[in-house]
Amino acid sequence: MEALLSARGFLPLIILFCVISSLRDGNAARLMGKGLSDQKLDNSSSDKSTPTFNVQSYGAVGDGVTDDTEAFQSAWKAACEVESASAVLEVPQGYSFMIQSLMFSGPCKCGLTFQVDGVLLAPDGPKSWNKQNSENQWLIFYKLQDFTLQGQGIIEGNGEKWWELPCKPHRGPNGTTLKGPCLSPTAIRFFDSSGITLRGLTIRNSPQFHLRFDGCKSVLIDNIVINSPALSPNTDGIHVSGTQFVGIYNSLISNGDDCISIVSGGANVDIQNVTCAHSHGISIGGLGNHDSQACVTNISVSDVVLRNSDNGLRIKTWQGGHGSVSGVSFDNVYVDNVRNPIIIDQYYCFTKGCHNKTNAVFVSNVDYSNIRGTYDVRSPAMHFACSDSIPCTNITLADIHLVPAEGQMMASPFCWNAYGATQTLIVPPLTCLLEGQPQSIIQGSSDACSY
């Protein structure tokens, strides 16, 4: 498999993704142990007895130019009110529907399926955006239960003109950022919902985050593709905030920011068989910004590939925050030309003007096993920069084999106030971890995180 990954380009990544997918099955079943309800994995829209609401029956044109927002709103209302059986809202193949920012609000009477087999188009840039609806969200799903968003279609965010705003990173002279309005919309946002399933879709070119969950519970994401250019700013693939019991499986994400980001309130998140390309890696954080509390627990990442990325497996926190990150495991991960394959950074900061602070988010019980591949020696393969006052504890590593890309000289790992142990011989040698436990940790550093 390493020989397969050594070739450059996107095609080897897709081939690898397909090979891994063929070797695994039943990933969704693992969610059962984490409290998710059983959910069907059949991607068909409905049988003949299921009430189906085709958006074209409500006036949608689907020519890619006409504003079809009102038709979608009417079709949603009708499907949401069905009482006798689960309904299907149908977006047919072969058509492109341009819609403005729109909230699909519940609760609906029964479980509802949104079947997208055509193309959904966002307005083309800020000048085409209807600010009367929402300036920073496009497709909004609110207060839904047992809801499925699926299909073979494309959700196109038309983000190019948003990325070129002067306030975006590196758009000003000499790589600076200019001041100005910069409320770029997230493509798809779920909040205050439960029993959510997404599968089969392609989501691309979001102005900002592609897929975001806030205050949700029981989420299954399976077999989706997220795609935007490497230099598209702030285009996180999947963002999890205040959301518990999440499964992310069998998906391919290539974007310009975090492949998957988990922030405060994220708990019981299982990530398997995901491939990330030219991203900022799988990130827990940033946490604790503006001296806030941040709590993240029980995160499992396994059978993942990361290629040509700035970061691999990252935990990032701001100084001055409080709370905790605990119960994190990374297992069976392949990295190909990744700048920071393994990194804990408790000095995360956007500028050079951040000051040392006493408080910090407490990071403990983080396990790394079977992490292999190549890294860019501009940074060490392993980087553990923990708070001066609140050390990282119980970091364990086993079966780590990371070598420089293209035969460069191996860089030594970096540790600062990090406690842990290596359970096997690892490459490169890691001798800077402190043994045992620190003599004291500020009481209350975890600040009673509860989930």
Image: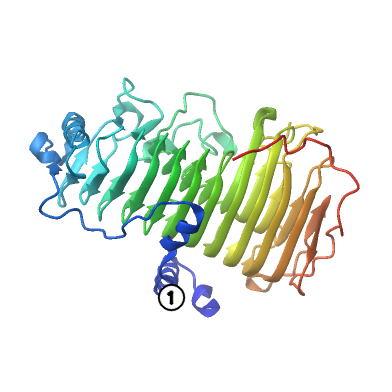
Query: In the image, residue 413 lies at what x, y percent?
Result: 77, 61
Position of 188 compared to 109: left or right?
right
Q: Give the residue type that dot 1 points to.
A: Leu
Query: In the image, residue 301 lies at what x, y percent?
Result: 56, 59
Tell me: residue 34, above or below residue 213. Answer: below
Using the rendered view, name the quadrant where residue 52 is placed: top left
Query: In the image, residue 248 lies at what x, y percent?
Result: 45, 55
Which SS class for mark 1?
A: helix
Residue 326 seen: yes
Q: Residues within 10 Å of mark 1 (few under 14, many from 20)?
A: few
Q: Residue at x 36, y 33 (%)?
A: 143
Q: Nearer the viewer, residue 26 or 318?
A: 26
For the C terminus, the image quarter is top right
Q: Which residue is mark 1?
A: 23
Q: Residue at x 41, y 44 (%)?
A: 210
Position of 389 compared to 364: left or right?
right
Q: Residue at x 31, y 27 (%)?
A: 129
Residue 258 seen: no
Q: Residue at x 46, y 45 (%)?
A: 232
Query: In the image, residue 425 lies at what x, y percent?
Result: 77, 75
Position of 270 compared to 227: left or right?
right
Position of 387 compared to 305: left or right?
right
